[in-house]
C-alpha cells in the first residue's frame, strides 16, 4: 500500500511481517507474531507479542511493548520500551529513556544529557552519554541528584554487569 508522506499509519497483524517504509506520520502497530520494521515516522507506538521490532528514525517519541523479541531503535526523541524477553538497543536518543526487560541486555547511546531509567532482571546494562556530561548514577529511585548534575541515570540489574560511560 502507498500513502502520502506524513500519513498516519495504523496496522493490526495477527501473523506476518509489517514493513513501513518512507516518511510517514504517527505510526501505531499491534502485531501478534512477526517482525515489525519502521523506516521513518513522527511518533511510534508498537505492541508486539512475538518478533523483532526495528525503528530507523522517529522524529518524536517511541513507545514499544514486546513480550518476546528484540527492540532496536536507531534514532528517536523520548523512548519508553519494555520487553519480557529480548535485547533493547537504543541509539541516537535525544530525550529521556525508560527501558525495562526481564531477560535481555540493554544498550543505550544518548545524543544529549537526559535522564535514563534502565532495568533488567537478567542481563547487562550499558549507557553512553556525551562527553563532558555530569552524571548522577544510582540504583535507588529515591536518591536525589547533587547540584550541577546534567542527568540522572537510574540502573538496576539483578544478574548482570552495569556500565555507565561518556564518549
Image (cartoon, grey):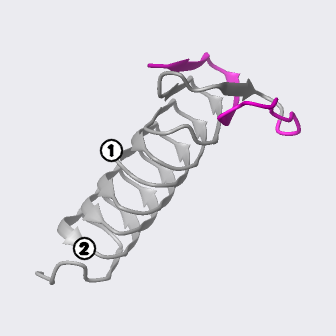
Residue 21 location in percent, x, y? 17, 65
Q: Secondary structure at mark 2?
A: strand
Side (left or right) of 139 relative to 80 = right
Please tell me the numbered disc located at residue 24.
Answer: 2
Of residues 79 and 131, which is closer to you in this image?
131
How packed is label 2: few (under 14 Cα within 10 Å), some, or many (20 or more)? many
Indicate the quadrant containing the C terminus: top left, top right, bottom left or bottom right: top left
Q: Nearer the viewer, residue 152 or 8?
A: 152
> In the figure, 150 relative to 97: above or below?
above
Q: Residue furthest right?
A: 142
Left or right of 104? Residue 160 is right
The residue carrying pointer 1 sits among few (fewer than 14), some (14 to 19) or many (20 or more) residues within 10 Å by Cα, namely some
Q: Which mark is residue 74?
A: 1
Check disc 1 and report its element: helix, strand or loop: loop
Horizontal relation, residue 20 to residue 81: left or right: left
| Percent x, y of residue 84 | 57, 46
Q: Is residue 159 magenta?
A: yes
- Magenta stretch? 141-167
Residue 126 image offset from top left, x and y in percent: 53, 24
Q: Which of 14/138 is in front? A: 138
Residue visible at 71% across and 31% down in the picture: 149
Q: Residue at x 64, y 42 (%)?
A: 115
Residue reaching furthest left? 2
Residue 90, by quadrant, is top left
Residue 162 coordinates in the image, percent (x, y): 62, 19
Q: CA distance from mark 1 to mark 2?
A: 16 Å
Q: Earlier in the sequence, mark 1 or mark 2?
A: 2
Amino acid at each position: 500500500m502507498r500513502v502520502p508522506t506524513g500519513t498516519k499509519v495504523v496496522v493490526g497483524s495477527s501473523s506476518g511481517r509489517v514493513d513501513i517504509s518512507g516518511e510517514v506520520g504517527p505510526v501505531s502497530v499491534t502485531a501478534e507474531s512477526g517482525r515489525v520494521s519502521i523506516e521513518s515516522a513522527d511518533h511510534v507506538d508498537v505492541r508486539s507479542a512475538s518478533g523483532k521490532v526495528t525503528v530507523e528514525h522517529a522524529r518524536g517519541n517511541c513507545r514499544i511493548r514486546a513480550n518476546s523479541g528484540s527492540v532496536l531503535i536507531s534514532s528517536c526523541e523520548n523512548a519508553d520500551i519494555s520487553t519480557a524477553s529480548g535485547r533493547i538497543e537504543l541509539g541516537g536518543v535525544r530525550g529521556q529513556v525508560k527501558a525495562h526487560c526481564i531477560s535481555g541486555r540493554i544498550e543505550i547511546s544518548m545524543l544529549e544529557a537526559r535522564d535514563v531509567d534502565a532495568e533488567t532482571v537478567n542481563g547487562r546494562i550499558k549507557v553512553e552519554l556525551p562527553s563532558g556530561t555530569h552524571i548522577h548514577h544510582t540504583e535507588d529511585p529515591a536518591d536525589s541528584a547533587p547540584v550541577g548534575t546534567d542527568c540522572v541515570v537510574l540502573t538496576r540489574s539483578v544478574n548482570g554487569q552495569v556500565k555507565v560511560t561518556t564518549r
